[in-house]
Image (tube, grey):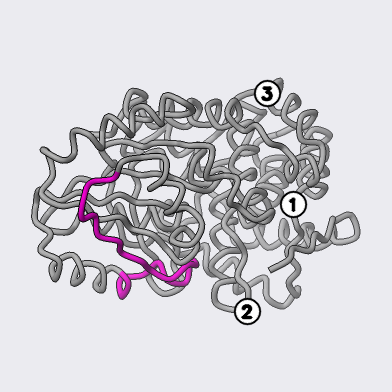
Amino acid sequence: MIYHHETIFTGKEAEKALNNYLLKSASRHSSTFILTDQNTHKHCLSILSSKFRLPEHSIILEIESGEVNKNLSTCIRLWKELAAHGADRHSLLMCLGGGMLCDIGGFVASAYQRGIDCVYIPTTLLSQVDASIGGKTGVNLDKLKNYVGFYSPPKSVFIISDFLKTLPDNEMLSGYAEVVKHALLSDDKYFHNLTKQFPNYEAVRFNENWADVVERSVKIKSNVVKSDPYEHGLRKVLNLGHTVGHAFESYSLENDAVPLLHGFSVAMGLIVELKLSVWLCRFPEMLSNEIIKYILAVFPYYRFQKEEIPKITGIMNFDKKNRDGKIRLTLLKKPGDLITNVICTQELIEKSLLEYLDLADEANDLKFQS
């Protein structure tokens, strides 16, 4: 069963709910494990322990940061560590981290002894507005994104804004890509209000109050998930920007020294799929150009060579949404009106990628400090 609104807590309500959950956990769970990565161990664990009374003798598990570590090898190590510490079916796994950590943590919890309790405390904007919502868990299979996983929702999600203060600029911007996607799923008015509030990269960077934006995105996604928890129909709208985006992400993971962040991949995927929406779904071309111009003003542009296009489109042949050997995308008729399962040829996708390359001169090449 997929969880509903009442198990997702935001703002001050989230802090109160987490405190209550931890109080009950002492009698409910035999042991507590807190999963972190290198970054959240360093920057977020102290916030968690100072604001909340964690169960005594909580055991910290740490994995290496980065999408490249979201694989079965990491899972096997975590299962062995859980077993070595005596974790049983009544143990609790608390996932303190971003989307990658929630994905792998939820997967580990759902498989260990056929399932132990798990809660998410998402620490990035991307995980707060998107990755922690919906019950999908998964790990990568070599270069194939989220190819192994379950529909297995956590018991609760506690979205606490204090953790956003720990994020570097690139992580905030990566999360904002999913906010833009949710706006396009909503309606034209919300999208344009968003562009006024965040007209450029600097507006995202210096924004200090994300509560309303996070809550709006959580409601948009959770409403979709509640209607179609196992992605038989409506939930496929959430894949907007992701078929092409995941191909960018997988290609970059294999070929770049510093792989693309998920949100940057989605932003580029939105550009390409907007082009396809114009050709295949009669999305208004002027509005498409306006949205693309906005994305190019806010997000970094991913540069690749024309000769690499067949490799990128080739990755799409392994997309989980495909059926009968055909690439299927979620595309737009207009903001808030989407069509799922649109069959698209590899040749047409290659044409859209060529047009993406033609946008290079308009792109805003953002540089981030490491």
Distance, label 3 to label 2, CA atoms, is 37 Å
Distance, label 3 to label 1, CA atoms, is 19 Å
Residue 60 belongs to the span the image colors magenta? yes
Quarter of the picture containing the N terminus is top left
Identify the secondary structure beneath mark 3. helix
Left or right: residue 290 compared with residue 50: right
- Residue 353 image position (x, y, % from top left): 72, 61
- Of residue 258 and residue 350, the one placed in the foreground of this image is 258
- Residue 235 image position (x, y, % from top left): 42, 35
| Disc 3 target residue | 190
Q: Which mark is residue 257?
A: 2
Q: Residues in magenta?
A: 54-74
- Of residue 255 and residue 348, the one placed in the foreground of this image is 255
- Residue 277 image position (x, y, % from top left): 67, 41
Quarter of the picture containing the C terminus is bottom right
Identify the secondary structure beneath mark 2. loop
Whichever of labels 3 and 2 marks the residue nearer the N terminus, that label is 3
Identify the secondary structure beneath mark 1. loop
Q: Which mark is residue 299?
A: 1
Task: Pick out the residue farthest to the right.
Answer: 361
Residue type beneath disc 2: Ala
